[in-house]
Every structure is written in C-alpha cells, then in structure tokens.
Image: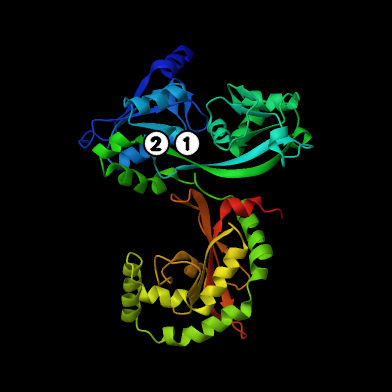
Amino acid sequence: MRLTAFLVFLFGTLSFQAFANSVALEGVKLRTTIWPPYQMMLQGELSGESTDTLRCIFGDINESFSVQVMPWQRAIQDIRLGSADGVFTSAPTPELEGVATMSAPFALEKWFWYHTNDIDLSDLDKLRIGAVRSSNQATWLESEGIKVDELVNEGLQLLRLVRAGRIDAFIADARHFDELMVLDGGQGAFSDYFARSFVRYMPLGVYFADEFLAAHPTFLKRFNEEIADCAGEAVTLSPQEIDGIRRVIKSRIEPELEHLNLLAALEEFNPAQENLSADVIQALDEQWRQEVMMQEQPLINEVLNRSASTYLRSVKQSTGRLISEFMLVGSAGLNVAQSDVTTDYYQADEQPWKNSFSSDKSELHVGGIRYDESSRRFQVKVSWPVVDRAGKSTGIVVIGVDVEEALKVKQ
C-alpha cells in the first residue's frame, strides 16, 4: 500500500468523473502537491479538504476532472507550458500573474509568526527566518522582501529548528502548526517554547490557466458560484476572533462616533422616509442600483453630500485601514448617510438590518467573512442599533471592518 501511494505521488493521475453525461469539457486537468490538510494521500488515494471541495464543485457543475500529484514548481511549470488547466491549493502568487486566474477562495488560512517568547518581531532583518521550500509562506515572504535564512522540506523541521535555537521564527497556518505540535508529541507545552503573533489571513483556491478560461468563458463563474455550498465552514471566523472584533469596535470605533450626531441625522430624515410607500421605495432602490453603473448619480450624490455622510467619512479616515465603509440606515431601511457608494439604497432585506434593528441596543452583530477580490482583503460587516432618548430603535449603524487589521490591534 505504501508503494502504491508513493507511485501515485510521483507519477499518478487520479480521475474524478462528476457525471456520466458531462459534455461541456473533456475533463479539467489539474495539478497539485501533498499539503495536509488540503491534499493528503490516504491508503493510496488523494484526499483532504481541497480535494473534497473540488469533488463537490465539479459534481455540482456537472464536469469531470483529473489530478496529477507532483512537486509544486513542476505544477507551476505545467500551467506555464499549457499542459495543465489548473493548480491547487494555492494562495495568490506572483508566479502565475499574467498566466492564470485565481478562483474565489474556498479555504482560508490564518497565518501567525511562531517564535520563542523572547523574540522581538519589530525588526525582521535581524532575525533568522525559516520556511518550507516552495510553500505559500516562502513565496509570500519573498514577495514581501523578507529574507529566508533556512529552507526545509517539511514543517516539523521548522518547529524543531526553533527549539534547537537554529532559527528565530517561521510563519505557519494555525491549524497546521497544531498538527505539527501533535506530531512532535511529548516535547512540552506550546507556552514552554513558543509565542505567536498574527500575520494575516491567506485565501486559498485554484489557479486556472488563462488559456483554458478563454476557451471556456463561463467556467470560472460557474465554479465560483458553487464554492459557498461546497466549502462548508472553511472560510469562517472563530468565536474568539468574533469577540476580538467586537472588542476593537468598542475600544476604537464607538468612542469616535458621536451618538447625538447619528441620532440628529435619523431624526431629520426618518419622517420623510417612513411615509414612502413600498412601491416608491422599490423604485428608488432600482434607481440607485442603476446609478451605481452610471456617471450621473443624482440620488446617490444627494445622500453622499449630506453633512452626516461627511461626518462618517471623517471617522472612517481616522481609523486608517481598519474600516472600509460606514453606513447609517434609517427606520424605513433606507440609507440616511454613508461614507462610500453602496450597491443598494434599501437595506432592510440585508442581514445587518435583520440582525440589529430590533435587537438589544448593547449588542454588536458580526456578519460572515467575505473576500474582496479587487483589494484582496477580508472583511466583515458589523452592525448595531441607534436608539433615541426613549430607548426606541431609530436606525442602525453598519460598518465594514478589515478583519486582518482588526486582529492586529493590541487589545
């Protein structure tokens, strides 16, 4: 059995037929390498989280695919030479810029620096850094201009090099590090040797060759549409991270917001908005969504030019990169003020409104994490109600929070 696994690892092509009547493609040719927990060989078969997700996606879009397991650099070369249609599981990498396009992420790694307790990360140039050869971390460190002093073949070596004092720090996904600690069992508790510092979230997906996508122009859209159902909880925030975001909002954002300014804006615009019929609200929302794609934007500009919108923009700017957008929504579910152009005018059918308008005034609702492909940043929407002097909810505040920036804040 081990020999079978070894041969498949080196030379094998594993085929996955989604449905017998698949006719759109002859079979998408993918490349990968072994990288637990995403790709693993179990009893001679390719398994792991990414493989399971791909089986689900290709099944849903009624297509077949095959996978060859090989060293990562050879997989990249196959994409460049046109002998492969895609490679997984990959973080954004400059190696494939202009050659392939990354799918929406179907997995999310949480990267930390792992180091001894006495290490100061403020000057990385003075530290001895380690990384796994050809790993996502090694590629990212190179792109950031951070010198890697020790390249190894697998992660357990990094852990042991830190223990031996031969390197000072390395970057690893939190789950992968926990697995390394288990493999290194009996060597002491985490806190005996290590501390960790958050680096960033890293989206993982499939890079599809641009030549393949040009030949199949609807494929990537179909593929991306199935990710949410097939990836399950691969892209989620932990309860501890949600609590951390709430603490940042309470300590950094709420003190900057003048409640009376928000209440004054709601008291000014709520009466007129509350008198609008459902048909008028629907027509205004449709007008707004059309204006988003046009140069002339009278309705949008009227809201953006309000003094309350100017105020929200100033608060947003004071937070640096922490906040991506501010919205103040009135009791009719329509925008009263906003820092940036939103895709919709009517918000009462959105989850932040449903979570917050009638909720306890002290509760901050943190939505699901989403990946913005244009900025390559992870964001969540946080919302809470705005109450008047009698304790009645008169609207809600919605803010877009950069998750990575929030989790870097010292609390």
At numbered mark 2, what does the secondary structure look like: helix, strand or loop?
Answer: strand
Image coords of residue 90 (percent x, y)? 46, 35
Whether residue 358 is visible here, answered yes or no, is: no
Single out the residue that lies furthest toward the top: 3
Question: Is 247 above or below relative to 303?
Answer: above
Label disc, if present, on residue 387 of the rendered structure: none
* Camera-nearest label, 2 or 1: 1
Is residue 89 left or right of 313 when viewed as pictured? left
Image coords of residue 369 (percent x, y)? 51, 53
Image coords of residue 79 (percent x, y)? 36, 28
Residue shown at the point (39%, 68%) measured from the top left: 344
- CA neighbours of label 2 inside 10 A, class few (<14), some (14 to 19), many (20+): many
Q: Amino acid at mark 1?
A: Thr
Residue shown at the point (41%, 17%) measured from the top left: 8
Label disc, if present, on residue 93 of the rendered structure: 1
Question: Pointer 2 and pointer 1: residues touching (CB < 8 Å)?
Answer: yes
Is residue 162 left or right of 275 when viewed as pictured? right
Q: Nearer the viewer, residue 3 or 306?
A: 306
Label disc, if present, on residue 207 of the rendered structure: 2
Question: Is 116 above or below relative to 352?
Answer: above
Residue shown at the point (42%, 78%) measured from the top left: 302
Q: Nearer the viewer, residue 58 or 313?
A: 313
Image coords of residue 76 (percent x, y)? 42, 27
Whether residue 255 is visible here, answered yes or no, is: yes
Location of residue 212 by image quarter: top left
Residue shown at the point (32%, 73%) measured from the top left: 287
Is residue 166 left or right of 389 when viewed as pictured? right
Q: Amino acid at mark 2?
A: Tyr
- CA neighbours of label 1 inside 10 A, class few (<14), some (14 to 19), many (20+): few
Counting residues from the N terminus, which is met first, the one under dot 2 or under dot 1?
Answer: 1
